[in-house]
Amino acid sequence: MTPETEESQVRVVQSARVALRRQLVGTRQNRVGSPMNRREFIKLGLGAAAAVVSGAPKALSAAATNVRHPRSERGEAMSESKTPGVRGYLLHLTHYDPSWFGKKSEEKPFDLDVGLEIVAALEEERFNLLAVDCADAVQYESHPELARHYTVPMEKLERLAVSARDHGLDVVPKLNFSRSCHHHHNDWMLGLDEQWDHHFDDDAYWQKAFELIDELVAVCRPKQFFHVGMDEDHDRSYTQYIAAIERLRSGLNERNLRTVIWNDTAINYPVGHIHYEKSLTAEKEISKDIVQILWDYHSVPAEAVGRIRERGFELWGAPGSHDRAQARKFRDTVLGHGGTGLFMTTWSHCNDPNRQWLLNGIREMGPVYRGEE
């Protein structure tokens, strides 16, 4: 069997597996989205049967391993593949930035049904990692004072995480510990009467941080990673910023998890240059086992890609969510320098009004993320 034939058969059987899963969960999908019609199901079923006759089960086993377990070794070798080993997606149960912050009083709880439909779409498009932006969207037993009017029971996050694992996705909890009076990225962590400068990276702050991290780890059961944000940090000095990243990294290492952070060095606008410089300085000091996600939604920061890899970091690229040409070039640049992942962001709330927009984005970008376009 040639590699091309084997790969083709793998895709057929994977498609059949998705179709069978959709049939099994058809009741839910009839409620929350568009199910596969009978003609599509029969067509894929016949294709799977033909693949099995020609010996595809062996290939399916290898492909299933690849889909279900993102391989994130460090990526020292130059990549010849157009398929990132890590194909990630960031889902927002809530978020904190200037635009979201101004509308917090109107925010509704995240919609679990939409989240479950997104999970199914991610499997169909062969993504293999789901990062979940949690902040104060869920109720913490250790810190009930963080609950807002849109906060939901932790059980809803658990149902989302279980579904994600069942669909072959590694689950990566995300809490942003960046400090900025402008961006508000960690305002979710403030109690009702607490101001931004209270407990500024003191022992009480870090105790609270890891109590929250531990609750999310227990519920989401991440295999490898925890995303700690750290983008657009205004309030810390360079030294304080580096110390905060290392404090998080040390605690996560104790929990057998690797730290994932944003890398701001693709920023090229004047008011954001402080973030560029702070992130650039951190690259020289922080531990090399910290995964860097370089984000740029309009261009391809080739110079930054090369520098980050030369410094020995594992690198995931975060292109825009609907520009396939930009994402494709970003992907090829990252993989060409030995990077290991591509990470899709939308910065949109997981709720019913955004349902179709989010699903369309996943389906539009899926071929790019799996290296078929």
Image (tube, rainbow, N blue to C red):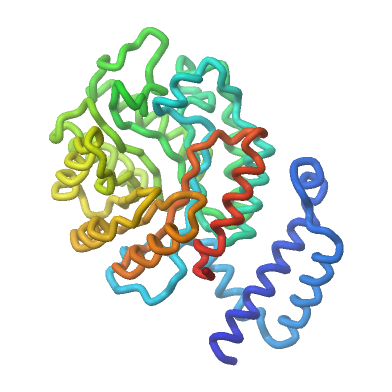
Q: How many marks?
A: 0
Identify which residue, 50 or 143, lies in the foreground: 50
At horizontal 48% and vertical 25% (from top left) the residue drawn is 136
The percent coordinates of residue 371 (x first, y second) are 50, 68
Residue at the spot x=30%, y=51% of the render? 292
- The residue depicted at 33 percent of the width and 42 percent of the height is 252
Q: Is residue 150 above or below residue 240?
A: above
x%, y% of residue 45? Answer: 79, 72
Please give the name of the residue rendered at 22% of the width and 36% of the height, measured from the top-left corner.
Answer: 270
Query: Which percent across, then down, holds residue 211?
Result: 39, 29
Vertical order, 363 against 53 (above or below): above
Q: In this view, does 285 lie above or below 128?
A: above
| View extreme (bottom): residue | 1
Q: Is residue 57 left or right of residue 253?
A: right
- Looking at the image, which residue sits at the far right? 38
Work out whether 256 lies above or below 132.
below
| Quadrant the N terminus occupies | bottom right
Q: Is residue 234 left or right of residue 343?
A: left
Q: Nearer the viewer, residue 208 or 36?
A: 36
List x then y, in percent, for residue 99: 44, 26
State left or right for residue 126 relative to residue 356: left
